[in-house]
Image: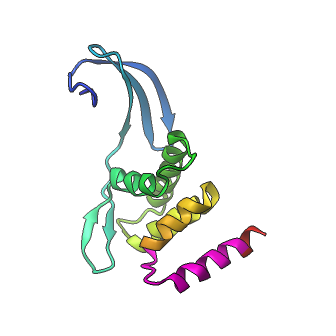
Amino acid sequence: MQCPYCSQPDSRVVDTRATGESIRRRRECQICRKRFTTYEQISEALLIVKRDGRREPFDRHKLLQGIRIACAKRPIAMADIERTVDQIEERLFSLGRAEVRSEVIGEQILEKLKELDPLAYIRYAIVYMEMEDVETLQRELERLMSERK
């Protein structure tokens, strides 16, 4: 496995754990001694049907990146973000379908972010719900605040 820090191909496995449908491996680079995490999983063909009808393969990295952007500069541990991605991915594959609409993923992300961090939820919702004005954002904030009471 290539080290993401120094690009050397030599690393050793420090810890291995099963996480739902994948195997999490903690690795240490033999050259720079930095540690990083990899995931091994069985490749299942799952296509995501986009709003415009295009189909593309499910990409865990894309899901992780979207959630990381929403959680940027928030007091959220990377382990919590990884766990959230694991849970969403597990739900998607448990549906047992070859294709899943992107809206299903978006709704699951919103549900998990609402539990994880309300500000990250709002950040993601602004893009996902295509909020184009302050009034729409204000209505969503009011709805979120009334749910929290």
Q: Residue at x 45, y 66 (%)?
A: 105
Residue lying at the far left in this picture: please name it: 8
Residue lying at the far right in this picture: please name it: 149
Query: How is the model colour-coded?
Result: rainbow
Q: Which residues are magenta?
A: 128-145
Q: Nearer the viewer, residue 94 or 65?
A: 65
- Count all numbered tags in the image, as a single digit: 0
* Left or right: 47, with 142 as reference point: left
Residue 66 screen position, x and y as percent: 40, 58
Residue 102 screen position, x and y as percent: 39, 71
Type of secondary structure dominating the magenta stretch: helix
* Left or right: 148, with 23 as reference point: right
Q: Residue at x 46, y 58 (%)?
A: 70
* Left or right: 53, with 127 as reference point: left
Q: Residue at x 45, y 60 (%)?
A: 92
Query: Magenta segment: does it hold 141?
Result: yes
- In the rendered view, would you say 9 is above or below 144? above
Residue 120 screen position, x and y as percent: 53, 59
Query: Magenta segment: does it hold 74?
Result: no
The quarter in which the C terminus is drawn is bottom right
Q: Which of the 4 image quarters holds residue 59?
A: bottom left
The quarter in which the N terminus is drawn is top left
Q: Nearer the viewer, residue 105 or 119?
A: 119
Q: Nearer the viewer, residue 43 or 107?
A: 107
Q: Residue at x 51, y 43 (%)?
A: 20
